[in-house]
Image (cartoon, rainbow, N blue to C red):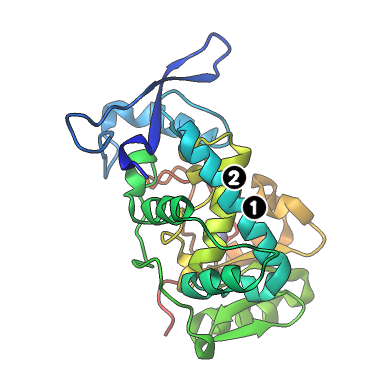
């Protein structure tokens, strides 16, 4: 794949407030399109920035999109991940690493081998600095082939999810002791592959807008679900567990009152990520 064509940058907003992609960044001079990387938001940009993260699921001027070629690769890779998840089941898919996924795709005709352009696409997306499309968080999983050590995780009954042994499990058990079945584990350990699937799916429903996708979901490698963090929800609250309505739940209020809600992505954080009141920051495993 020609890395130069990887991204498009939207530069002009339409009268309707919709972002229009107007130009493909040419890398003839720079070698690769590198929109300015801003590790921290400067004062002058703050209002603009906050508007974006508060209206996280909308297109904004300056958002970065996949170009047409990579949009095609996004779709074909995503479809392959969907078929793969069907073959291995949801539980195993949470833990699947890159090498095993490649092998599995090769073995099962119903999944089909990844093409070279797809592999280049996935590799470029993984190793590209997410800051170029507006995600400023850390990257706990540095290698595409990083594995979830199976001995270090446990399946949490009735949740379909896994947690790392040590502090993550202990934290969840403590929470469970306080709230009982009212609190549920909505997402635990997620491998690079699972994060790829979630992120590509979000980018797909966002029309190829990488910036918009990364305001809701950490790009592959950047998710702390890969090393420790997890999401909690209120039983029976359904999709509201992933909206701001979660702050009205008893689970949120109780955990907040007890100091359990150390959030990875607090309101108006400067990491380029929406407010996620359900995402518990564990940090280290031990
Ligand atoms: Zn989370």
- The image shows residue 57 at horizontal and vertical percentages of 58, 36
Q: Is mark 1 within 8 Å of ligand 1?
A: no
Which residue is identified by label 1?
Answer: 79
Q: Is there CB contact under 8 Å for labels 1 and 2?
A: yes
- In the displayed structure, does residue 285 sit left or right of residue 91? left
The label number, if any, that marks residue 138 in the structure image: none
- The image shows residue 164 at horizontal and vertical percentages of 53, 81
Q: Residue furthest bottom?
A: 151
Q: Residue furthest right?
A: 236
Give the CA separation, mark 1 to mark 2. 6 Å
- In the displayed structure, does residue 231 sit left or right of residue 65? right
Residue 276 visible somewhere in the drawing: no
Image point 70% across, 55% down: which residue? 241
The label number, if any, that marks residue 75 in the structure image: 2
| Disc 1 element | helix
- The image shows residue 49 at horizontal and vertical percentages of 40, 32
- The image shows residue 246 at horizontal and vertical percentages of 68, 52
Image point 77% across, 78% down: which residue? 158
Q: Picture quarter containing residue 233? A: bottom right
Image point 48% across, 26% down: which residue? 60
Judge by depth and name the residue closer to the eye, 256 or 153.
153
Residue 2 against residue 184 in the figure, above or below = above
Residue 112 visible somewhere in the drawing: yes
Judge by depth and name the residue closer to the eye, 251 or 270.
270
| Disc 2 element | helix
Q: Quadrant of the C terminus?
A: bottom left
Question: Ligand 1 quadrant?
Answer: bottom right
Q: Quadrant of the N terminus?
A: top left
């Amino acid at each position: 794949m020609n890395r130069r064509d990887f991204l498009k940058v939207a530069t002009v907003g339409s009268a309707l407030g919709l972002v229009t992609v107007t130009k493909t960044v040419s890398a003839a001079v720079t070698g690769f399109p590198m929109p300015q990387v801003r590790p921290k938001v400067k004062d002058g940009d703050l209002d603009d920035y906050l508007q974006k993260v508060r209206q996280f699921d909308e297109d904004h001027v300056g958002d970065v999109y996949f170009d047409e070629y990579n949009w095609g690769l996004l779709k074909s890779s995503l479809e392959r991940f969907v078929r793969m998840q069907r073959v291995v089941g949801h539980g195993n898919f949470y833990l699947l690493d890159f090498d095993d996924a490649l092998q599995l795709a090769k073995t099962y005709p119903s999944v089909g081998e990844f093409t070279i352009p797809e592999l280049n696409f996935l590799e470029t997306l993984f190793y590209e600095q997410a800051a170029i499309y507006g995600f400023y968080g850390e990257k706990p999983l540095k290698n595409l082939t990083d594995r979830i050590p199976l001995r270090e995780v446990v399946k949490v009954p009735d949740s379909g999810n896994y947690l790392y042994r040590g502090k993550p499990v202990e934290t969840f058990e403590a929470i469970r002791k306080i709230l009982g079945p009212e609190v549920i584990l909505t997402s635990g350990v997620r491998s690079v592959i699972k994060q790829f699937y979630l992120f590509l799916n979000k980018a797909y429903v966002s029309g190829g807008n990488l910036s918009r996708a990364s305001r809701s979901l950490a790009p592959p490698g950047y998710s702390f679900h890969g090393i420790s963090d997890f999401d909690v929800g209120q039983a029976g609250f359904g999709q509201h567990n992933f909206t701001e309505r979660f702050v009205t739940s008893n689970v949120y209020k109780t955990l907040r009152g007890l100091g359990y809600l150390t959030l990875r992505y607090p309101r108006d954080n400067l990491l380029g990520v929406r407010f996620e009141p359900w995402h518990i920051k564990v940090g280290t495993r031990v």
